[in-house]
Image (tube, helix red, strand yellow):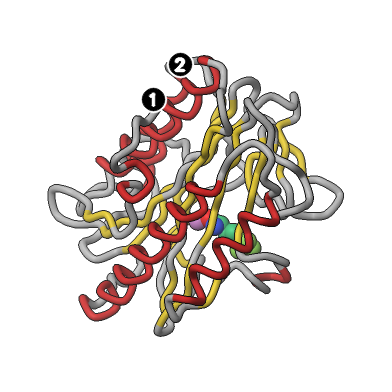
């Protein structure tokens, strides 16, 4: 049984969700061919600190940066580095904030310059699979309903669903119960109750779903080195319809979204 959050706690998570969403959009504006992923980390860290929060990834289990910048075949947890983004790459930016003792956590995969149609479709389907999952984040449902929705949608396009990592509850800790897998069966798993706050984060592969951990102990790569995409939002489980605490609207507003 996972305890629901008080509305006071949810308000602090909402503030973190909004700041995280805005930070992600700020990084998105800086994504371009010729830019290093280290530069993107600087943009994020500066923005987060300028808003009176701290980057919650930095130092988490020894993680060395404010963001994860996962390029192409890196699924998640790529370290920002001197790698220079090039036309046709995709880069998943995952970041979070800590403000007044609570956490934010969100991710978006950005195309760099001109990206081929097949890869844009991977981004589109991964983002849509996240929304399919959010539709199931309603009181009275089960965690397996979310996983099943994500999995069945992504697999219907022939994509792979990474199983080694999953979404999670969020609150005073960035990772709380329940775990939220991106695969599963309807009606199975922990029950979803009003006021639970969870992060749903599909990690979807263009090819085979299998992954391996890099020697640095963090970066997760696709085994076949094909591209992977990752999108993450934080939501409150509510009756009838989940409430989003983070959003992609700051990234996508006023833009011609290509996927
Ligand atoms: N944001 C990741 C998640 O969704 C966690 C990043 S790991 C960290 O669970 F060490 F970088 F924080
Ligand atoms: Co997360």
Q: Are marks 2 and 1 in contact (CB under 8 Å)?
A: yes
Q: Nearer the viewer, residue 251 or 154?
A: 251
The quadrant of the picture occupied by the C terminus is top left
The residue located at (55%, 71%) in the rendering is 55
Q: Nearer the viewer, residue 70 or 184?
A: 70
The residue located at (60%, 59%) in the rendering is 67
- Residue 128 in which image quadrant: top left
Q: Position of residue 56 (x, y in %)?
A: 55, 71
Residue that badge 2 annotates: 157
| Crowd tier of the residue under label 1, counting other residues whose Cα lies within 10 Å: few below 14, some 14–19, many 20 or above | some
Residue 246 in view of the camera: yes
Left or right, 172 with reference to 1: right
Q: Any mark on residue 153, and which?
A: 1
Which residue of the protein is positioned furthest toward the left in this rendering? 240
The quadrant of the picture occupied by the N terminus is bottom left
Please, what secondary structure does the residue beneath circle 2 have? loop
Left or right, 179 with reference to 149: right
The residue located at (42%, 27%) in the rendering is 124
Left or right, 192 with reference to 212: left
The residue located at (51%, 65%) in the rendering is 175
Please, what secondary structure does the residue beneath circle 1 have? helix
Name above or below for residue 97 compared with residue 218: below
Name above or below for residue 216 compared with residue 31: below
């Amino acid at each position: 049984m996972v305890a629901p959050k008080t509305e006071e706690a949810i308000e602090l998570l909402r503030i973190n969700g909004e700041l995280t969403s805005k930070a992600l959009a700020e990084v998105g504006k800086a994504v371009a061919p010729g830019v290093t992923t280290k530069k993107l980390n600087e943009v994020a860290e500066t923005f987060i600190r300028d808003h009176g929060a701290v980057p919650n990834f930095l130092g988490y289990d020894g993680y060395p940066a404010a963001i994860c910048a996962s390029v192409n075949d890196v699924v998640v947890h790529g370290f920002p580095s001197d790698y220079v983004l090039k036309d046709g790459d995709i880069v998943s930016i995952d970041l979070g904030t800590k403000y007044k003792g609570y956490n934010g956590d969100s991710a978006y995969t950005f195309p760099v310059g001109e990206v081929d149609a097949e890869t844009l479709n991977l981004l589109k389907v991964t983002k849509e699979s996240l929304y399919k999952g959010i539709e199931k984040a309603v009181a009275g449902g089960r965690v397996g309903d979310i996983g099943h929705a994500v999995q069945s949608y992504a697999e219907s396009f022939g994509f792979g669903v990474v199983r080694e990592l999953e979404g999670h509850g969020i609150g005073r800790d960035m990772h709380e119960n329940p775990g939220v897998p991106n695969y599963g069966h309807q009606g199975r798993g922990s029950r979803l109750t009003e006021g639970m706050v969870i992060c749903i984060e599909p990690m979807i592969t263009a090819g085979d779903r299998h992954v391996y951990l890099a020697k640095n102990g963090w970066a997760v790569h696709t085994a076949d080195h094909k591209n992977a995409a990752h999108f993450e939002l934080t939501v409150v489980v509510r009756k009838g319809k989940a409430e989003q605490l983070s959003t992609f609207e700051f990234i996508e507003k006023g833009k011609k979204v290509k996927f």
